[in-house]
Image: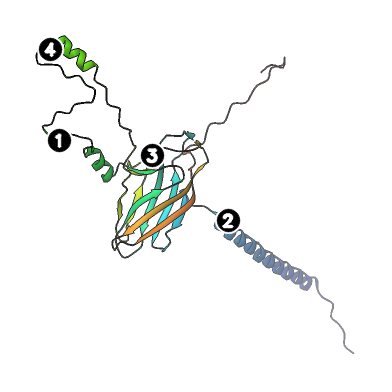
Amino acid sequence: MTRSIPATPLTGRRTVLRAALLASAALGVGLLSACGSGQITQTDAQVPAVPGINANSKDGLIALRDGVVVYADQYKPGSTVPINVRLFNNSTQAVKLTGVTSDNGTFVLVGGTKAAAAAASPSPSSTHAGASPTLSGTKKPSAGASSSESAVAESEAPSAAPAPTSAGSSEISVPIPVAGIVVLSHNSGTYLAVDKLSGAPLLSGGSLKNVKFTFTYADGKTTTIELQNLPMTTPLTPLPKPSPVVKHENGGE
């Protein structure tokens, strides 16, 4: 006949302690798993520190990064709209940015070498050296005319209409070396811009439509980067909050 030995208080206490340790270990593993899954989800939803749109060329060799419209409360029709972009050349040959178009107006290069050359070059309507230009309709005083008659003749000469001004050069040619980067930024002084905004005003939070960048390689081949929307960046500092409206006891404001 076999007799069972009753458990002593010490044996029971060890059993309870072992069960508690096992439960704590299981709970710790569960918490670590939940914490890890939460970190993965948050990392996946993070956005770059620099706001803007990223895109690659159709051949995958040119990269556009952080493309944005410079912030403003509003761009009125006819105003200049600057943009910021960074361009990377991942090909094995030199390439140039040779054109930018959009539905909102003509793009120009501001502050670049082409813009400086265009500003320094003479206009096609300039006259040859040594030639004295005469305006149609100008009365030329005779040799014996008095000084008062000459002054009257000069005052009747029509004034030339001012030439339309442009923010920059429409001849865009920005070289990007092999494995190189070009930063076109409004802050640096060399940037791309819509010369004269067409259509409706561009409000805060809006975007330029159907912006197309054209690149030409050294061998003459071309590729493009097309953006349906080029968004406006956010302001560097938060906009001030409107002050609350205080109502008086008599119902007035």
Q: Quick one: which residue is furthest to the right in this view?
A: 1
The residue that disc 4 covers is 145
Of the 4 image quadrants, the one containing the N terminus is bottom right
Can the viewer see residue 6 in this picture? yes
* Rendered residue at 9%/12% (across/down): 144
Label located before the other in sequence (3 or 2): 2
Label located before the other in sequence (4 or 3): 4
Q: Give the quadrant of residue 63.
A: bottom left
The residue that disc 3 covers is 195
The residue that disc 1 covers is 128
* Rendered residue at 32%/48% (across/down): 172
Can the viewer see residue 51 in this picture? no
Disc 4 crowd rating (10 Å Cα; few below 14, some 14-19, many 20+) is few
Could you tell whether 246 is left or right of 195 in the image? right
Q: What mark, if any, has residue 40 been given in the picture?
A: none
Label located before the other in sequence (1 or 2): 2
The residue that disc 2 covers is 42
Amino acid type at image mark 3: Asp
Q: Between label 4 and label 1, give the one nearer the viewer.
A: 4
Compared with residue 146, is residue 33 higher up or lower down, i.e. above or below? below
Q: Do the residues labelled 1 and 3 touch (CB within 8 Å)?
A: no
Q: Distance between the residues labelled 4 and 3?
A: 49 Å
